[in-house]
Image (cartoon, helix red, strand yellow):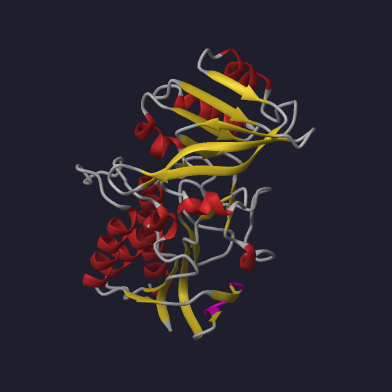
Amino acid sequence: MKNVIILGTGPAGYAAAIYTARADLKPLVIEGPEPNGQLAMTTEIENYPGAAEGMMGPALMDLCRAQAERFGAEVVRGTVKKADLSGSPITLETEEGEYQCKTLIIATGATARRMGLPSETEYWGYGVSACATCDGFFFRDKEVMVVGGGDSAMEEALFLTKFCTKVYIVHRRDELRASKIMGERAMKHEKIEILWNSVIDEILGAVGEHGAKKVTGVKLKDTQTDAITERPIDGVFLAVGHTPNTDIFKGQLELNDDGFVNVKHPSTQTNLPGVFAAGDVMDPHYKQAITAAGSGCRAALDAERYLSHLEG
């Protein structure tokens, strides 16, 4: 029986682990299928407080893990296959065995939707990104593409115009899904051009002067004629949404229409007693490492208060 189990080892999970461990709650952290979360695939982070010179995503997460373990958190491999959140204790089943706990912090994150191209995977973090706020700065005075047709794509494209000389929006149809105001704002911007009825068929790249891979262009496919054209480009940003990792909790946790966990703001309390959620799994808006870490702290404090009332 554990006081608290934390699912996920991204910024939210490790922040929760640090705070609960310092509160002497001896947390158990289950890594999940993507140890270190999305930052494990991030090449360089420059917007996280304390990373003054920039830091590789995996290196930052390794530091977070060491800090959590220093205070007594136990980090184990495993992926939860089944969860019973209905009573006390909460029961979790993994391939490695069964765990029980008094409180649960869900920090399983959200996965950026991808196009499914092998070249997309090859250049992920080397010119292919799903976060303009995180990586836009690296494309100053360059030309980039944004894939998508909704409000998120328009927001990403408009943000990138602060740095980039040209931003192309690649959209598979001849009409945007975005709200009218956002669509008009993007279409009227002098740096933005929309490539209608187009999808990326392949991302092209090369090895740069320092030995690192980089994106050099794309092959575009016309969705009406299937014609393929090549276009030089420096970066590709996906803005086709995120899928929260909440499948095993469906039918138990209250989720919004997009599958993100609903919490009772400003707390991280879910609809179930003793169950809290932090990070991208409950945040469809910001999706930043620092906001995830902040919510992990809040979840830890909420869990600590819950346990003190339970025992009091």
Question: How many numbered circles are shown?
Answer: 0
- Location of residue 113 in the rendering, given as x and y in whole percent from the top left corner: 59, 49
Residue 1 lies within the magenta run: no
Q: Residue at x 46, y 49 (%)?
A: 123
Position of 173 with respect to 149 (left or right) is right
Tell me the quadrant of the picture where the N terminus can be found. Answer: bottom left
The magenta stretch is 85-92
Q: Residue at x 64, y 21 (%)?
A: 183
Tell me the quadrant of the picture where the C terminus can be found. Answer: bottom left
- Location of residue 12 in the rendering, given as x and y in whole percent from the top left corner: 40, 57
Q: Residue at x 55, y 20 (%)?
A: 192
- Location of residue 132 in the rendering, given as x and y in whole percent from the top left corner: 45, 36
Towards the viewer: 241 or 23: 241
Residue 89 lies within the magenta run: yes
Q: Residue furthest right?
A: 224
Q: Residue at x 59, y 12 (%)?
A: 188
